[in-house]
Amino acid sequence: MGVEREKIDWKPTIDYSKCDYCMECVKFCPHKVFEVNENEEIKLIVRNPSNCVVFCRACSKTCGPDAISFPDKNATTQRIKEIRKEESID
Amino acid sequence: MIESYAILPCNGLDKCAGAISREIAIKLCENAGNEMICPVFYRVAETKYNKIAGEHPLLVIDGCPTRCASKLAAEKSLKISKRITITEEAKSHNIKLSSGLRLQENENTLVELVLYELENAHDNAAVVSIESNTSYHFDYESFQNGKFIFRVPGNPQIYFNENDCWAYVIGNRARIGVTDFVQQNLSDILYFTPPEIGAEIDQFGEVGEIESSKSVFELISPVTGKVISVNKTLEQKPELINENPYESGWVAEIELTDFESDKELLIGFDKYFEIIKKKVEDLNG
């Protein structure tokens, strides 16, 4: 993208009111974005947001209860272009 | 519904969407010609159902995106001819499903709508696919990791996104598809969901799905525009994506609307070749 990954706000957000901890997302994602903590009350967290591939939404497609959401794609695209522009001026 | 199907429903007793898939399957099987495959019994006694699946095209009815029925089909090496997912149908019809397992008014409405659409599926093929007559040439470079060979075309007209999709741009059109990285990772591709002809797609928007027994891959469009053609052959032969994801396994053609802007966030051969090598190394440790 020509922009440092940390500057791009793209990561899954878990709606804990819907999540049933089936862990399909964890099994699916090869990038270790999620972390399972079996002994905690909240058993699943987004541990490594920067590992998430920008514009990939595939884990949400595996989510039966539709508990995973992502930022708005067009707003993210726009923001990346703005950052590139700002950095080229600097 | 033109064909008589072998119907493999989710039959889930976990969510309302499962109960709906079961109801739709029962109603379809009340019509002559359609045959039910019970997903529970199939796991322990497959002979009967393998015969049915061998005699009819397979309609899979998944309840939710966990896609248990599709996964069962993949496990049994069944080729899926048509698939619907109840939660997606509910979304597209703007119907909110209840959390209970009993079908109420909304759920019954959805059952009727889905049945109607399946019965009339042959009427919905009105939009014509316009495939270009352009000839495409590919000059590949490749590298090997273990027994796997990864090819990447080096033609300057071909652009990539970091989501492993390519666009071969000629004039105001682009042919798009996935790279060798995707097909090698998915292994045997069993099902292709094409984008709709005429759909307006944003750059990085979804432009179809491919699925293997291992995983589902959402194609992320490298370009913005209108879908003017899809590779219909893939619906019957999704394995062409494994055979050659750049040529016979192309996915769709897009009439471009803002390629100058799209190009800002795309990469060429040199950069993508580096990225794919790193991804392969990372995956294999």
Image (spheres, helix red, strand yellow):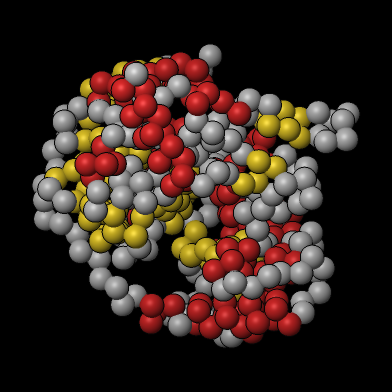
At 59% from the left and 60% from the top, the residue drawn is B50
Please determine whether, in this image, residue A37 is positioned above or below residue B97: above
The percent coordinates of residue B266 (x first, y second) are: 30, 34
Q: Which residue, as the protein is rendered here, is positioned at the far front?
A: A90
Q: Is residue B54 left or right of residue A80?
A: right
The percent coordinates of residue B119 (x first, y second) are: 50, 82
The percent coordinates of residue B250 (x first, y second) are: 28, 47
Image quarter of residue A80:
top left
At 29% from the left and 29% from the top, the residue drawn is B267
**Residue toward you, B216 or B105:** B105
Q: Which residue, as the protein is rendered here, is positioned at the far bottom?
A: B31
Please determine whether, in this image, residue A44 is positioned above or below residue B236: above
At 57% from the left and 77% from the top, the residue drawn is B114
Q: Is residue A64 left or right of residue B184?
A: right
**Residue toward you, A77 or B131:** A77
At 73% from the left and 33% from the top, the residue drawn is A45
**Count of marks overlaid on the render:** 0
Please determine whether, in this image, residue B150 is positioned above or below residue B230: above
The percent coordinates of residue A79 (x first, y second) are: 43, 37
Residue B88 visible? yes
**Residue toward you, B71 or B46:** B71
Image quarter of residue B151:
top left
Residue B37 visible? no
